[in-house]
Amino acid sequence: LWAVIYERGIHAVTYQAVARAAGVSVGRIQHYFSSKQELVHAGCRAIVETAADAHQERTGSLAPMEALAELLTASIPRSETFRLGMAVWYAYLAQTVADPQIAEIIGGASRETFEYAASLLRSAGAPAPAHEAARLVALSNGLAQSVLIGALSPDRATETLRNEIASLRAAVNSTDAGAGRSAPSARTSSAQE
C-alpha cells in the first residue's frame, strides 16, 4: 500500500495496484479490506501506531528531556526507507482536507504528540510546557519537511532540534538552581513518568 502511495499517490490506490506491489492476489486484499477507503484508512492508522510503538520502545527508560529529544528527532528522515515513509505520511496529511476519517486519525495523533511533549516538559520542570511543546513540535515538523525536500541535511535538522532542547534544559536547570532546588536527576525524572 505504502509503495503505491509513494510512487503514485493515494488516488492511485486500487486493489490491483496494492496486490501487484505486495505480490499477492487481489482476493487476498479484498478478504481483509472491504473497500479502497478501508484499505487507505488502515494504512494511515498503521503509520501512526508503528511510530508510537517504535517511540515507546526507544524511550521507555529515558528521562523526560531525552525522551523529548527522541520524539522530536525521530521524524527527521535519515534513510531512503524513512524518506519513503515520510513521503507517504505527507500524502496522508494532504488527504486530510478531503477525507474526514484521515483527518480524524492524523488530528488525533497530532494532538497526542503535543500532549505527550507537554507532559515530558512538565515532568522535566519546564516553564509553560504546553507553549514549549507546540513550539518544539512545530519546529520538528518544519525541519522534517525541509529534510524531505532536500533544503536541509538530516544532521543539520537534528543539531537544530538538539540545540533548542539544550537551551530549554539550561533554562530549566537555572530556574531550579535559582529557586534553591537541585535539578531532577534522570533517575528521579524517569520514576515520575
Image: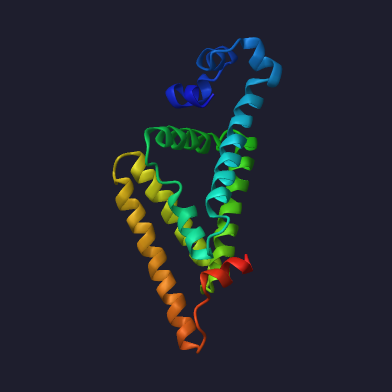
User: Residue 8 at what x, y percent from top left?
Assistant: 45, 21
Q: In front: 131, or 176?
A: 176
Q: Which residue occupies 54% across, 23% down?
A: 1
Q: Is 71 above or below relative to 79? A: below
**What is the quadrant of the C terminus in the image?**
bottom right
Q: Is residue 69 visible?
A: yes
- The answer to whether residue 34 is visible is no
Query: Vertical placement of 103 versus 30: above or below?
Result: below
Q: Position of residue 64 (x, y in %)?
A: 53, 64
Which of the pair 50/43 is nearer the observer?
Answer: 50
Residue at point 36% right, 53% down?
Answer: 158
From the top left corner, tell me how far across and down residue 5 is, in percent. Answer: 49, 25
Q: Is residue 98 above or below residue 122?
A: above
Place residue 23 in its image quadrant: top right
Position of residue 180 in the picture relative to residue 99 (left or right): left
Q: Nearer the viewer, residue 90 or 28?
A: 28
The furthest residue to the bottom? 180
Instruction: Quadrant for residue 84, please give it.
Output: top left
13 to 182, vertically: above or below: above
Position of residue 192 in the picture relative to residue 173 (left or right): right
In x, y percent, where is residue 169? 43, 71
Q: Residue at x 29, y 44 (%)?
A: 151
Q: How many marks?
A: 0
